[in-house]
Structures are given as structure tokens and as C-alpha cells.
Image (spheres, rainbow, N blue to C red):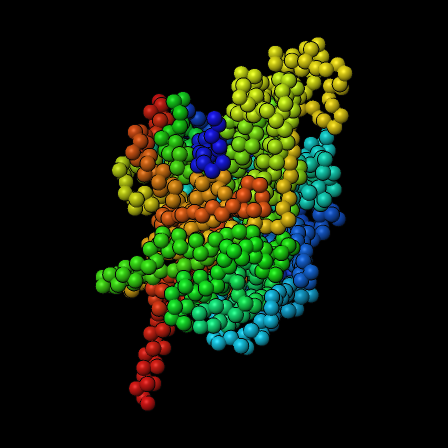
Amino acid sequence: MTTRSIGHSVQRREDPRLVTGNGRYLDDLGRDALAAAFVRSPHAHATITGIDITDAWEVDGVEAIYTFEDLDELMARPLPVLIPHPALTHPRTCLALADTEVNHVGEPVVMVVARDRYVAEDAAARIVVSYETKPVVVGVAAAREAALAVHDDVPDNVAAHLIQEVGDVDAALACSPHRLTIPLTIERSACMPMEGKGVYAVWDRDDASMRMWSSTQTSTGVRAAVAARLGIPLARIQCMAPDVGGGFGVKINHPWPEELLVPWAARALGRPVKWAEDRREHFVSSAHERQQLQEVEVGFDDDGRILALDVKVWHDNGAYTPYGIIVPIITATQLLGPYKPGTYRCEFWSLYTNTVIVTPYRGAGRPQGVFAMERTMDAIAAFLGKDRTEVRSTNFILPQDMPYDHGLMFQDGRPLKYDSGDFPASLAKLKALVGWDDFAAYREQAEAEGRKVGLGIGCYVEGTGVGPYEGGHVHVETSGQVFVATGLTSQGQGHETAFAQIVADELGVRFEDVHVTTGDTRRMPYAVGTFASRAAVMSGNAVAAAAKVVREKALRIAADALEANPDDLEIEDGVISVKGAPDTQISLSTVAVLSNPLRYAFDDAAKAATQFAGTFDPDKPPVAEGDEPGLEGKGFYSPTQATFANGMHAAIVETDPVTAEIRILRYCVVHDCGVMINPLIVEGQVHGGVAQGVGGALYERMAYDESGQLLNASFMDFLVPYASEVPFIETDHLETPSPLNPLGIKGAGEAGTIPVSAVLASAIEDAEGFPILSMPISPSELWELRRQRASAAAHSATTEGDR
Amino acid sequence: MTRITVTVDGAKYSDDVEPRTLLVHYLRETLGKVGTVVGCDTSNCGACTVHLDGRSVKSCNVLAVQVDGHEVTTIEGLATEAGLHPMQESFHEHHALQCGYCTPGMIMQAIDVLNTHPDPTEEQIRLGLEGNLCRCTGYHNIVKAVAAAAKAPGAAAVSSSKVGD
Ligand code: FES
Ligand code: FES
């Protein structure tokens, strides 16, 4: 009996090539290609008054130098606004190369193409761009104040303003027994995949066609965008995502200026061209996320039940809005987590600043929303003197409330309606895992040793697997090997493994015989992309649907061959047999041969499908009406709404009484993403997510100075955690299947990251005994908070004494 | 241009290089050994880690001319006909990689850690890998993989150093 593959911690198919250095990332391709380098703006806000490229031409090996002037009409247009929204009243996007104005440090101004990257950079260094600098807007506070404008025609810096309200918040606030106002701040961080972006394009002059590779999270999106801007029919352009060294969101935005310019130059020059982003470029010209100012006003009763929740968010969207307002929309909707406040209103302003653009970074607005909600929960508990888990429980949506409709519109334009989840059960598991009820004793013991420890908690719900759709294609070759394609891309999530597991189970073949390709428009031209923890849900169900189509076809052909009823057949390990009569069997490879009537035999097996083999009914056409040759099939999955995963984290931290150093002693995660295809991969996603969350909570920030210079644009100064900063993560799982899709799965990609800032703020607050309202927090900031508290206490003691 | 002769993954190469060429670019562009990758421009990420005469170095921090007459082992020189190196095997078994971009450098550094600490504590592993960034795994499974590899015979050995001439 074949064992099911789904649900097992199958080791990854990707690994053998990746552990031996045989992965192929973007910069590993095209060794003979010309290299591109860019001259980027050194100013955060300036008018370009002149560009002198003459000196650069002196460098031996330079092939081309392009400025805005060189771009044709299509290429000279502003980049697209990918996700328009009625509330996004003032969208602005950059040009592929800046024309008269630059709006952040790092904006591309001149492109140099040369023999190799060394030469291209030599030439770029000789180009002189003259600027007249303009005053800059840095930080949300300055944007909100609007004394200065980023874009002259948007004087208040407001790209978008949106209010969503459920119930009468003002009335509910007015009659709430208790009210609190909480001001909160979250700073910028960034995805920082270990591999930057990169593009490689090969133009075939004779065929007038383009093959391009991009380190992207959406090869179909890039293909469509490049086709539109280069004026190439889709049929003449293919885009592939090779091995991608991490994405975490930044590679879903597209087309990046370089994604248009590289193929455009390849066509103009008739030579392959490649650009691989270096780390500094990634810091100043990709994307960041997270920065928000928030103000929460909450009304609640004596039990801590929230009667009214009124949230205002000022969101920093950077210099341009190519990805629309997805991030603040997610903050506004996912803030609610597992709770059901009596009434809710969220109003946000998405604001321009002269800094790098903001597009989704793992969690995509949720970490900020969860921070607001969970800080509020802790504040209520502190106010009422209640246990923090009790206040949360009081506000939980219960399993019997499912499906639960919040009455809001989610980021996919569809209702924010939770499909399933058991929050009380998750909390019980978490409390058991971290030892919630024993912590008081542990603290007492620690205090006796002169140590300061704190316990924190954070809960979240994550809408995953948003539409519109993904597709799968399954092809059984005559060798019996099964080739699967899905269009979305992979950046380390183990899709080749997980999707092979699904197809192996659905089709009835061995896992080893299934081979998956992702992100290749030649194999699957219809796709959306890898973001929003959607790959497993969307492509998982799509390849399952495709496998079902193939299975049915295989059974039909086998039934003919075996003269049996298709309903009496089963497929196991690639062999179709009559149930109960296993000797009456035919292999899937033979069925594949028979599925394609042949005139010419190319090998022994193929003979069975040729015209004199006597295997067919002379009264029927070789390919039946409505049928197609080949044992292959396609399937698409397109859900009506997102599926909602959830989780709860707890951490124990220790803060040094003298230096204020913050150490995580334990980090516990309870996670529910429905049915797990491969627990090993799910756990890995959680571990990595938590580590990114730890980075965002304790170490990472974008240090812009008042002139808009990013002061820490390197790994020397922007502190991505090393192995020495992240503890082992303790995990436990709940599997509440999603009723929305046949496999019962929910997404898992972003989960780990989402609540970490909230959890660590909660733990540090618990250790220190005063509110933590701003994240990330460094030891020096914690030390400063202590000092302020101490001096305020001393001050009030003196005033007391004076009286 | 300067002439260098260097043994890489057991094979001898002689090439003219510009004095400014970094070892990692020599490996990738001149020799086509693209298994060793670049993740930063400040010598912080360790993605480019290789062994120079048996000790780990960041190949973005070494000039090609400096390896003249020396022996370099990259991730591509670890596996033998008998199969994967025990450290590669352990990374696979413990799901110590996701996107795999940090992996070549991480594995080379992990072998170096075991050279220094054949029976490492968790802390020795973590500190030994400080200098190699991974953005995907949270290090959880990497630390486990290195600890498990320490128990496997030959995990600190590098095959190609035996091949050298
Ligand atoms: S590329 Fe060598 S340390 Fe980052
Ligand atoms: S596996 Fe992606 S950076 Fe380590």
C-alpha cells in the first residue's frame, strides 16, 4: 500500500543541488553577458540640471550609456501603479531613469553597459550628474506635518486616506466604562534577502524574441510588464525565475526599473545583458517597510471586553506608490487578530517621504497591526490588573462563531471572513508550552539571583492564500516520470518538494518520480506570484486539480486497455490495476504511450501506439472528439476568499540590570496553518520568520539622517541577526483544516514574523514594569527609558517632599 | 595583469588576473565556479566563504593575486564520488537550508568550526558561525545540522585537500 506523502516531513528535492554549489541564481547565469551598472542619485530630493557622460566613454570596454533622453516613448512613461485603489487618490511612480527630479537617494539616473561589472562601475564613476538640491521630507512626523512636500502636486504628502468602520465607534467609546489612549511607533526595516535582485536578458534578433531571467517573485508579472513597455507580443517573450536567494516580499514588486532597462538594452545592443544588484544598491534602491505612527483609543468594560476600538495610522510609503496601499490596508484589517471588538474603526493616511519606497515585507503590515492590538491587550490587562491571557480570552472569536465575518474589506477586495480556527485551544497549548502559569515562580527565583526576566505574548490571524488564481500542469511522460509545472516562483519555500508530495498522492505515483518546475512562463504562462503566504494554498490546490484530471484520463485509457470499468481501477506507485485483481494491471508509462496515437515509433515502447499495433478500435478516430493526445492535464484554483491561519507566540526575555542588554531566553510558537503538507518545511518557515521578527524587534532599523541619507546601508551597520542572536524556537502545532479548499491547507510563509515585535515588547515591558510603545528597541533605548523613568520618579519624589 | 597559479578543488589553474580582482570574482568569472556566491560588499555575510589552505576565508575579502601558489577549496570541491560530504548530508537531513544562497558559505564555515571544535557546544557552533548570515532559516536547523555532523565521521575533513598535488 502506498503511504501518503502529504503530512510527512519529506526531505527536500531542492537540497542536493543547493548544498553542492549547483544551484543557479541569477548572477550564475550568462557568463558572457554584458554587465550593467547604474549611476544613482546621491540626494534625497533634487532637480537634475545636467548629465555629463563624455568622460565615461573613455573607459575601454564601455558599450552603452543611457539616460532618460535615450528612452523611447513607452519606456519613458512612469512605471505602473500595480494595485490601484479608489482611496489612493495621489499615486506616484518613478521613471525607469530619472528625468528632471529625484525623490530618494538611490533612484537610478544613468545606466552603463560594459564588458564586465568592474568596467561598468569604472565608467559610472566618471559620469557627472549636476543637481540642485531641494528640502527633504524624512520620517512620518515630517510627512504628516507637511511643511514640505515630496511631490509638488501633492502638497499634504497624502497618497491615500482610508476609513473603515464597523458599528458606531464614537457612541460605544462614549459609554465605555474605561478608556485608554496609546501612542505607538514602529520603525523601518527591510526584507534583505541574501541574494539581491537581478535581471539577465537575451534578445534573439532573428526570431525577434526575448528570453529573460529575473530574481523575482512573479515571472508572469515581469513578462507582462516587459512585453508592454518594450512593445513585444507576449508570444515573443519568456521569463524565468531561476533559483532565487530569498525574496520576503521585495521581489514581488515589479517591474523594477532594471527589469525594464536590462531587456531593453539587450534588444538595443543585440547582446545579452545582465545586472546583479549589489548590497548597497539593495539598501537604497529596492524597498523597505514597517514604519508607522499609530494612535489607539480603546473603550472596554470591567472584564476587559473591548467595546470600541478606534485606530489611526500614519503610514510611511516612501517616495512612490507602485504597490498601492496594500500594506496599510493589511494593517487596518489584520490588526483585529483573533478578537471581536464591539465596534471598530481604522483610519489611515499613507504618506510620501523622500526615502526608499515601501512595499510588502514578510508580514506586510500585519506586524504593525498586531503590535497595535497586542499592546492594547496588555495595556487593558495592566489597567485592570488582570492576567494578560485572560483579557485576550475574553475577546476571542470562538470556534462556534466560525465562519466569522468582521464586516470589513480585506486586501483582496473581498470580505474579511475567517474560515476556521480554535483560538482558545491555541492559547491553551501556548500556555502549556511556555509554562505560563509557572512563570511567577521562575521570576521570583530569577529576582532572588539579581536577574530581571519578563514573559510576553502575542496573537495574530493571517489572511493567506489570496486569489485571484494559480494553475498547475501535470504531464506523465512515456517514461512514467511525471513533470509538473506551476507558474508562481520559489525563493526557498521548498515548492519542488511540497507540490511533488501533493501530485504523488493525488495521482498515485512515487514521490521520486514527480518533478516540479516553478516560475517558468514557458511551462505555465498563467500565474500570479508568490506573496501573501499563498503558494501552498493556491498552487498546491491547482496542481492537485491538474493531477486529478490526469488521473481520470489515465483510468479511462487503462479501462479501455484492460477492458475494465474505470471505477474498478486504482493507481499505486505508477501502476494501474483492477481492485482486488492486482495481476490485471498496466503501468502509467504504457498508458502515457497509448494516450498519444503515433505514426512513427521512436522507441520500443512507442510501437504500441502506432497504426499497425492493433491496439485501437477502427471505428473510432485515434483522438476522440473533445479529447487531446498525451497524458497531461491542467487545473486552476481560484478561491472566493482568503483562508485565515493563526498563531500565538510567547517569549521569555532577560534584561541586564546595568547594561540593558536584551536576551531572549525562550521563544515559543503555537501555529495553525490547517493541514500541513510537509511539517519539516512549515517549521522551517516558522523558524526563519521568527528570526526576521527578532531582527525587526531588536536590531534592524533604517537610520535616515535629516537630509535623507541612509546612514547604515550595509550589513556592517544594519544588523541582521547572526546565529548568536536567535535562540532555538520551540514549536507546537494545531491543524484546523480550512473548509475553503480541497486540501484543507492555509498559508504559513509569513506567520513566524508577524507577532514578534509585539511579543518582545510585551516581554520587555513585563521585565521592566513600564510600557514599551516603540519598536525596535535597542539596549541604549531601553537604558534611556529606564533613566527617564528614574528621573521622573526622583522628580515626583522631590515634589512630594516639597509639599 | 598578474600571472597566478592556484589549486582550486584539486585542479591546478594558471591565469592572468587584474591585481584588483577579488578571489570570489576570479572563482566565479574566470573559473566559472559559480557555486560560491556574493551576498554583500562589506565582508559581513559570509556567503562567499571558501577554504584557503584548509582554513575558512571570505573570498570577497581576498585578492586573487594573494592566492598565488595556494590551495582553495570551494563548496564544489566537497562532494566525492562516494557522495556528499557529511556536512552537506547533515544540512540536507536537518533542513538547514531554504533558498540555499547562504548555504555554500555556511557549509564551508561549519566545517571550519568543526576543525576548531571537533565536539562543539551549542555556543561554540553559534559563535563559530557568527560572520555568516542566513535570512531564511533562523539558524535553528543549521545549528542542529552542525551539531549532528560533528557526530559523523569525517565531517571536519575536506576531501580535495587530500587530492592536492
Ligand atoms: S560576499 Fe563575502 S562576506 Fe558577503
Ligand atoms: S537559506 Fe536562504 S539565506 Fe540561508
Res. A516 in view: no
Residue A334 visible to the viewer: yes
Q: Position of residue A491 (x, y in %)?
A: 52, 41
Looking at the image, which residue is at 55% across and 77% down?
Answer: A174
Quarter residue A435 falls in: bottom left
The part of the image, by quadrant, that contains residue B13 is top left
The residue shown at (50%, 41%) is A493
- Expressed as whole percent of the image width and height from the top left, the position of residue A105 reads 57, 57
Residue shown at 50% from the left, 61% from the top: A339
In front of the other: A734 or A472: A734
Q: Residue furthest bottom?
A: A803
Q: Which image quadrant: the C terminus of chain A?
A: bottom left
Q: How many marks?
A: 0
Relative to A648, say whether A524 is above or below: above
The answer to whether residue A792 is left or right of residue A510 is left
Most foreground residue, A138 or A373: A373
Relative to A737, is A110 on the left or the right? right
In the picture provided, is B3 more to the left or to the right than A169? left
Indicate whether B33 appears above or below A619: below
* Residue A156 drawn above or below residue A116: below
Which of B152/B129 is in front?
Answer: B152
Q: Residue at x 45, y 34 (%)?
A: A10
Instruction: Please provide percent x and percent y for residue A196.
Output: 53, 45
Q: Position of residue A9 (x, y in %)?
A: 44, 36
Residue farthest along the left direction in this orientation:
A448
- Residue A426 vs A660, above or below: the answer is above
